[in-house]
Structure formats: C-alpha cells, structure tokens
Amino acid sequence: MDAPNACDITKEKVNLETSTIAWSQLQRFFAAGAAVFVAAELDLVDVAYQFSIDNKDQVALWMRDNQLALVSDQQASKWFETDAEVWAVVVKPWILVQPC
C-alpha cells in the first residue's frame, strides 16, 4: 500500500470540512462578497483544494467557463426564498457553495 501524499491528505482534510447548510445561515458571507458559487458539474472538494493551493490558472479557467463566480444577487435571493440547502466549505477568506 502506498503512503498518502500531501495532496491526498489535504483533499481528505477538505472533504471532512464540507457540510450541507441552509443558505440563510450564509447571508453574512454573501453580504461580505465572500460567497463563491461552484457549478454542480464540478467537484466541490477539488475546487476547494485548488483554492487552498492558490491554483490561479485553474480557478481562472472555471471562471471563464462560468463554472465558478461570486454568488449573484439572483442566486442568493432564490436560495433564500426557497430555504435552500447548499454544500459548503470554507477556504479562507472564501466560502464555496454548491447547490445540493
């Protein structure tokens, strides 16, 4: 059995820190401009890992493809009105959120 590498350990740590949470509990992060939408087709753990290692090139690609962006007013309003649950993980100073 191979010993885990640093990448695996970090991704495992990130995975353990993800959780579902009511969007209404994240309003202060949205108001502060720190809530980042992650498209459903992306792996939230992988996105968080790329943020944690400051992989600006990958983040820029996701942003260019509209798979990653600050949560819009329209998204926030819809999630609030429907009392939506989202998957979330904190990668300071950001909170990454993905619809469940």
Image (cartoon, rainbow, N blue to C red):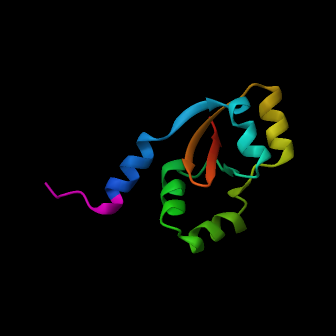
Quadrant of the image occupied by residue 29: top right
Question: Camera-side residue: 75 or 16?
Answer: 16
Q: Is residue 91 above or below residue 25?
A: below
Residue 41, percent from left and from top: 60, 50
The range drawn in magenta is 1-7
- Residue ID at (85%, 45%): 73
Dividing the picture into quadrants, the one containing residue 31 is top right
Q: Residue at x 84, y 36 (%)?
A: 77
Q: Is residue 5 magenta?
A: yes
Q: Is 81 situated left or right of 1 in this image?
A: right
Can you say which quadrant of the picture contains the C terminus?
top right
Residue at 61 percent of width and 55 percent of height: 93
- Which residue is more in the foreground, 93 or 71? 93
Q: Is residue 56 inside the magenta stretch?
A: no
Dominant secondary structure of the magenta stretch? loop
- Count of numbered tags: 0
Q: Measuring 51% from the left and 62% from the top, which residue is drawn there?
A: 50
Where residue 30 appears, x then y in whole percent?
A: 75, 45
Residue 26 on image: x %, y % = 69, 37
Left or right: where does residue 94 sit relative to residue 6?
Answer: right
Quarter of the rendering occupied by the N terminus? bottom left
Q: As drawn, which residue projects farthest toward the bottom?
A: 57
Q: Does residue 87 sit above or below 13 in this rendering?
A: above
